[in-house]
Amino acid sequence: MILIVYYSGEGHTEKVATALAEKVGGRLARIEPVSEAGMFRKGMMAMFGMRAEIRPVKTDLADVDFLVVATPVWSRKVPPYVNEYLSKVTGAAGKPFSVLVEMSGSGAESAVEIVRKSLEAKGMRFVSSAVTVESDVDAGRFGPTIEEFARTIAPIAVPAA
Ligand SMILES: Cc1cc2nc3c(=O)[nH]c(=O)nc-3n(C[C@H](O)[C@H](O)[C@H](O)COP(=O)(O)O)c2cc1C
């Protein structure tokens, strides 16, 4: 089972994650904050790598073969809700994962690194990453990026017999 877990404040990451789920036959799980912070606080919390409470969501990966984390870039890092999710992941050792980041213009590399380090510390195995840009997502121009990304996931999640 391919689990695609995502946070999306304004719907862009959700759009991309949904397209990916359709391509690879993945199951979607949305990270939802218990309460949304104001814009300034959001930026600060991300900048300082803080966590913030989220609603119950699938964090036990016992029945998951492949994890994809999809997140917007905030302050060249990731939202506090994503940090909280990553800290809660269990049953992850040895499993492969990929990272999808959505941004308006810069900071994708450092955001990918944050997710990568956090999951590698749990014994997971990094496979690939992809970046989408807000203006392309708004214009519906992210198909090729997702197709290429999906090709890195499917063969590993469903090995040929
Ligand atoms: C608090 C905050 C900080 C952000 N920081 C960055 C940033 O450092 N770099 C960037 O390219 N975009 C940044 N953005 C823009 C988002 O990554 C972009 O709007 C993205 O499309 C949002 O995805 P969503 O619609 O799924 O929430 C920031 C947005 C917010 C709300």
Image: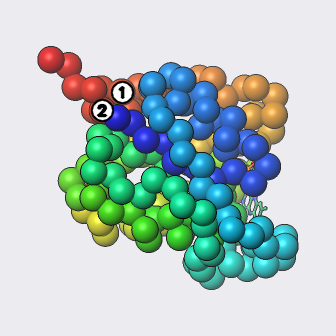
Q: Residue furthest top?
A: 161
Q: Secondary structure at mark 1?
A: helix
Q: Is residue 99 left or right of residue 133?
A: left
Q: Residues within 10 Å of mark 2 (few under 14, many from 20)?
A: some
Across and down, in percent, residue 40 comes to 83, 76
Q: What residue is shown at x 45% (from left), y 25% (from top)?
A: 25
Across and down, in percent, residue 114 comes to 49, 66
Q: Quadrant of residue 12?
A: top right
Please, is residue 20 above or below residue 132 in the view? above
Q: Is residue 39 left or right of residue 63?
A: right
Q: What residue is shown at x 84% (from left), y 73% (from top)?
A: 38
Residue assigned mark 1: 154
Residue assigned mark 2: 157
Give the CA separation, mark 1 to mark 2. 5 Å
The answer to whether mark 2 is within 8 Å of ligand 1 is: no
The way the protein has been coloured in the rendering is rainbow
Foreground residue, 63 or 14? 63
Q: What residue is shown at x 66% (from left), y 29% (from top)?
A: 142
Q: Is residue 108 visible?
A: no
Asked if marks 1 and 2 touch (Cβ < 8 Å), the reply is: yes
Query: Split into 4 quadrants, where in the image is the C terminus?
Result: top left
Query: Split into 4 quadrants, where in the image is the N terminus?
Result: top left
Q: What residue is shown at x 59% (from left), y 37% (from top)?
A: 17
Circle count: 2
